[in-house]
Image (cartoon, rainbow, N blue to C red):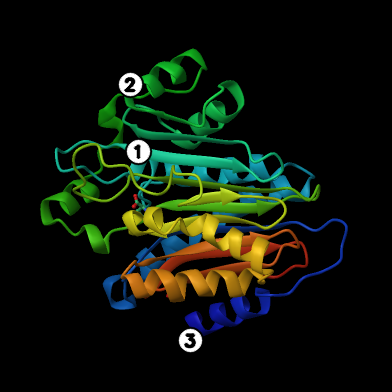
């Protein structure tokens, strides 16, 4: 019953644009996967809902008070990185070797500048380091040890790698439930200045090996923002999102074929990606603040809010 209510709210939110000059819009995800309601207790579902809504409200406050979409996506993702429920920051999954290696990216749709970090193991909030890479370095992506050195130079908080230990994720590794235990986080936002931004942060996939990097920090694969088209944050089986450059493909369909946001997302997520066997979803916004949250899995933690008052939360 509750799910039906949320789906209704989501439908109301989809595809509605408005002409307010004070238009803002925000969407957030907490990972996609083939999850089913029976795998969760009511308490767990409530907890996810509470945390997602808390994260969303941080972004809403920033946007409402005229703040930038970049600040909104960074702060929302930071909050979710600190929450052990999600596979990012504190709740990151374990690699095959029993380590935590985190990936994150942020992109400014106004300037197309972007920053990303990959395979970092001692940075408390990888999304903030990604932002520093964007703003304080001439590069787009830094990895591993070099990224940590850059963090130190830029006053980004470092932690001992034991900070990322959570019993839940450790047990996931032991059981190798990787496909069922996603939980990457992401946020897309449009601010009242008309600028789009996207951010994604993840621990990657449980049991990953050999320094594997996923789609989240790869601009155009798991993260993309461009004021003239859309902002996208993805979650799912990263290898497919990289090979099909999912986030940029959605933008390109809007740019070159004039597709609406919804049509472009549907073509990529329910068409190309699904046909290739790639599982996952995206949250996306266009420059009018239209929201699209679509996945080809049974679930994706997702929520949105807009300046016209529409808002919603859903999992399945
Ligand atoms: N896309 C992430 C990765 O492949 C995982 C996820 O979204 O669950 O690293």
**Residue at left offset 30%, top offset 32%:** 163
Q: Please, is residue 128 above or below residue 269 in the view?
A: above
Label located before the other in sequence (2 or 1): 1
Residue nearer the viewer, 183 or 273? 273
Q: Which residue is mark 3?
A: 1
Q: Residue at x 45, y 20 (%)?
A: 151
Category of crowding for the residue at label 3, using alpha-carbon neighbours closer than 10 angstroms: few (below 14), some (14–19), many (at least 20): few
The answer to whether mark 2 and mark 1 are in CB contact below 8 A is no
Mark 1 closeness class: few <14, some 14–19, many ≥20 residues within 10 Å: many
Q: On screen, 302 above or below 228?
A: below
Spatial CA distance of label 3 from label 1 is: 37 Å
Classify residue 82 as left or right of residue 247: left
- The residue at which mark 1 appears reads as 102
- On screen, residue 182 versus residue 107, left or right, reads left
Residue occupying image coordinates x 64% and y 49%? 59
Q: Is mark 1 within 8 Å of ligand 1?
A: no
Is label 2 or label 1 in front?
2
Mark 2 C-beta to ligand 1 under 8 Å: no
Left or right: 301 in relation to 15: left
Q: Give the x, y percent position of residue 7.
A: 55, 80
**Secondary structure at numbered mark 3:** loop
Which quadrant would residue 301 be assigned to in this image? bottom left
Vertical side of 250 occupied by 73: above or below: above
Q: Which mark is residue 145?
A: 2
């Amino acid at each position: 019953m509750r799910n039906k209510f949320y789906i209704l709210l989501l439908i109301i939110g989809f595809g509605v644009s408005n002409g307010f000059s004070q238009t803002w819009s925000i969407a957030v995800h907490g990972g996609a996967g083939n999850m089913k309601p029976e795998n969760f207790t009511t308490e767990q579902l409530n907890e996810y809902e509470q945390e997602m809504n808390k994260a969303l409200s941080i972004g809403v406050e920033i946007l409402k008070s005229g703040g930038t979409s970049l600040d909104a996506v960074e702060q929302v993702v930071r909050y979710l990185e600190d929450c052990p429920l999600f596979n990012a920051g504190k709740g990151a999954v374990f690699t095959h070797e029993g380590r935590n290696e985190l990936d994150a990216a942020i992109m400014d749709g106004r300037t197309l500048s972007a920053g990303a970090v990959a395979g970092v193991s001692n940075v408390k909030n990888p999304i903030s380091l990604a932002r520093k890479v964007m703003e304080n370095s001439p590069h787009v992506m830094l990895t591993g040890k070099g990224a940590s050195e850059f963090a130190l130079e830029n006053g980004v908080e470092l932690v001992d790698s034991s900070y990322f230990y959570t019993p839940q994720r450790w047990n996931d590794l032991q059981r190798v439930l990787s496909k069922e235990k996603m939980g990457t986080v992401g946020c897309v936002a449009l601010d009242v200045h008309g600028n789009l931004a996207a951010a994604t942060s993840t621990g990657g996939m449980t049991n990953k090996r050999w320094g594997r990097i996923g789609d989240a920090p790869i601009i155009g694969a798991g993260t993309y923002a461009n004021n003239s088209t859309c902002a996208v944050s993805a979650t799912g089986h990263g290898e497919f999102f990289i090979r099909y450059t999912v986030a940029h493909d959605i933008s390109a369909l809007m740019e070159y074929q004039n597709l609406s946001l919804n049509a472009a997302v549907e073509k990529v997520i329910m068409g190309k990606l699904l046909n290739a066997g790639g599982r996952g979803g995206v949250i996306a916004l266009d420059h009018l603040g239209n929201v699209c949250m679509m996945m080809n899995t049974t679930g994706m933690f997702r929520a949105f809010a807009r300046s016209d008052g529409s808002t919603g939360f859903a999992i399945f």
